[in-house]
Amino acid sequence: GAGVSQSPSNKVTEKGKDVELRCDPISGHTALYWYRQSLGQGLEFLIYFQGNSAPDKSGLPSDRFSAERTGGSVSTLTIQRTQQEDSAVYLCASSYQGVQETQYFGPGTRLLVL
Amino acid sequence: KQEVTQIPAALSVPEGENLVLNCSFTDSAIYNLQWFRQDPGKGLTSLLLIQSSQREQTSGRLNASLDKSSGRSTLYIAASQPGDSATYLCAVRPGMGAGNNRKLIWGLGTSLAVNP
């Protein structure tokens, strides 16, 4: 009965480097979401997966951001050439498609770009 | 464009008080509304989900109401405890007519401190 897990829990990187953030959703959950939470701001939707496809990528802030999901399970969010404004907590959530669709969140990855 | 506002931004109360957190949204065409709790350094925990056709949901000491026509929801916490201290977030899922309605629209949250 594991929940959503994310790794790493914290990441410090230098400006210009690439980073990969990982999300393991709850087993059997077909929907997966990535959000970003910046200091003093609300949660910002980034991307949504249904299975391995991403019908909604509208929240990705720039072409430096990309995400993929394989096997209908694990997802990776990649940020290329990181900038200081990318510093935030990146949250992943999953849900079992249905009427309720409660989203279950992971603990997040705190990213700090120096 | 749907916007979600939460008032107050912060609240500090003594243990045992009953309290109300407010959430308002600008577009009444919603699919559902959720209340979440966020503890420092941790992810979000879903507390209550109210479908657009429902008026309220209850779980233990928590009661959430929804008045879709006026664009308001309240989260009522009875007999508050220090363990209730956290940030409470309100999120709206737009109605089915709003294109892709998978994304939740979030408020900034109410930071609650319950003092022993």
Image: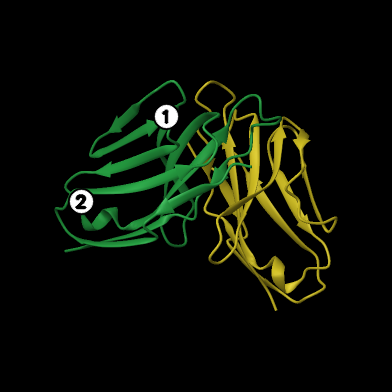
The picture places residue B111, in percent across and down from the top left corner, at: 37, 60
Query: Looking at numbered disc 1 in the image, what kind of residue is underneath it?
Result: Ile
State the image quarter where residue B54 is shown: top left
> Quarter-wise, where is residue A39 in the image?
bottom right
Question: Which of the two residues, A9 or A55, is positioned nearer the viewer here?
Answer: A55
Classify the position of the N terminus of chain B by image quarter: top right
On the rendered structure, is A48 left or right of B40? right
Question: Helix, strand or loop at disc 2?
Answer: loop
Q: Are marks 1 and 2 on the same chain?
A: yes
The reply to whether residue A3 is in sight is no
- Chain letter for yellow? A
Q: Mark 2 lies on which chain?
A: B
The local crowd at label 1, few if under 14, some if 14 to 19, many if 20 or more residues have their Cα within 10 Å, is many
User: Compared with residue A40, is residue A62 higher up or lower down, i.e. above or below?
Assistant: above
Residue placed at 34% from the left, 41% from the top?
Answer: B74
Tell me which label, 1 or 2, sits earlier in the chain: 1
Q: Can residue A89 be seen in this view?
A: yes
B10 or A43: nearer the viewer: B10
The tint of chain B in the picture is green
The relative height of residue A5 versus residue B101 in the rendered view (above or below) is below
Q: Mark 2 points at which residue?
A: B80
Q: Residue B28 carries which label?
A: none
* Residue ranking furthest to the front: B70
**Measured from the top left, where is residue A66 in percent x and y?**
80, 51
Say what secondary structure mark 1 lies in.
strand
Q: Residue B95: image x %, image y %?
A: 59, 27
The three-letter code of the residue at mark 2 reads: Ser
Q: Is residue A71 left or right of residue B44?
A: right
Query: Which residue shows up at 55% across the image and 36% down it?
Result: B27
Q: Which residue position is annotated with label 1?
A: B50
User: Which chain does the numbered disc 1 sit on?
Assistant: B
> Looking at the image, which residue is at 33% across and 28% down?
B56
